[in-house]
Amino acid sequence: MTHQTPISTTKLQAAIIDLDGTLVDTLGDFLVVLQYTLDAMGCHPIEIARVDRRFIEFTVGKGTDDLLRRSLAHAWGLPDDDAEVAQHVPQAWQHYQQHYTRLNGQHSDVFPGVLEGLEKLKATGLPLACLTNKPTTFAQALLERKGLRSFFDHVFGGDAFERKKPDPLPLLKTCEALGTLAAHTVMVGDSSNDAQAARAAGCPVVLVTYGYNHGEPIDQVAALAHIARLDELDWAALAAARP
């Protein structure tokens, strides 16, 4: 059941929106690309099969390097922090980049309510930014292919700044680009990763309930609102209260 806290006192100047698990269901893309990557790394079929959709749902969200490291470790039956695994990440990245560029968006779908929610947000006149830990070139291409790019004034990926979410730096830098105050810029995401970054940056946060929160219930993470669809929240009311 959707839980919302009163929003009339929130004075919004802009919105920052996550990508994977918030706008687009990309687990299919990750699965296919990782399978190709592991095959190129010489993994056996049984090792490749270990990296399934459920594993990716628990793992995705903290950047490509982290995803590759954990996927290799899981496939090989090694600890995530194994030194041998870390040594192979740069090589895996080369294969991953090649396959993701080719397959980006082919096995993913825009979540229900996203297009309508973005249209409502755009209609308020609030500037919008997409902030993701996915590499910027992949994020830009995915948004273009799904017909979502035109909604955003800025798109920043995990390689855009020195640190990634859940560090607050990407949110603070995105607020700078938008020309807004963090306290009046809402972060919309699907995970505790987004909430932690928003909290540290001083941004209010709205969480969708259908994403990839590392296998944990998202409604246990404090937020301004928990919504089942992006078009469910009264964005016009939020925007009307902005300074």
Image (tube, grey):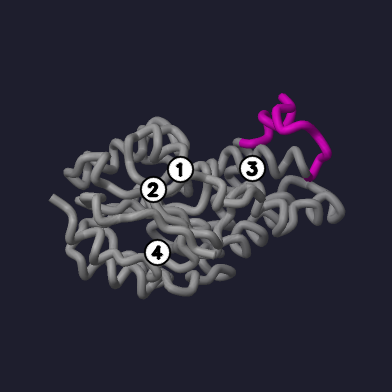
Residue type, label 4: Leu
Q: Position of residue 31 (x, y in %)?
A: 66, 59
Q: CA distance from mark 2 to mark 3?
A: 28 Å
Q: Residue at the far front: name it.
A: 6
Q: Tell me whether the residue at label 1 lies in contact with that at label 4, contact meaning CB atoms closer than 8 angstroms.
A: no
**Alpha carbon separation for disc pair 3 and 4:** 22 Å
Q: Are marks 2 and 1 in contact (CB under 8 Å)?
A: yes
Image depth: mark 1 or mark 4 in front: 1
Q: Is residue 130 above or below residue 114?
A: above
CB atoms of marks 2 and 4 within 8 Å: no
Real-space Cα separation, disc 1 to disc 4, in angstroms: 22 Å
Q: Which residues are magenta?
A: 75-89
Q: Quadrant of the N terminus?
A: bottom right
> According to the image, label 2 marks what residue?
205
Of mark 2 and mark 1, the one earlier in the sequence is: 1
Q: What residue is shown with label 4?
A: 143
Q: Which of the two marks, 1 or 3, is nearer to us in this view? A: 1
Callout 1 secondary element: helix
Q: Nearer the viewer, mark 2 or mark 3?
A: 2
For residue 21, which numbered disc appears in the image? none
Q: Residue 68 shows which numbered tag? A: 3
- Our reading of the magenta stretch's main secondary structure is helix
Q: Is residue 241 left or right of residue 108?
A: left
Residue 6: image quadrant is bottom left
Residue under the image location 20 percent in, 51 percent down: 13
Q: Is residue 29 above or below residue 98?
A: below
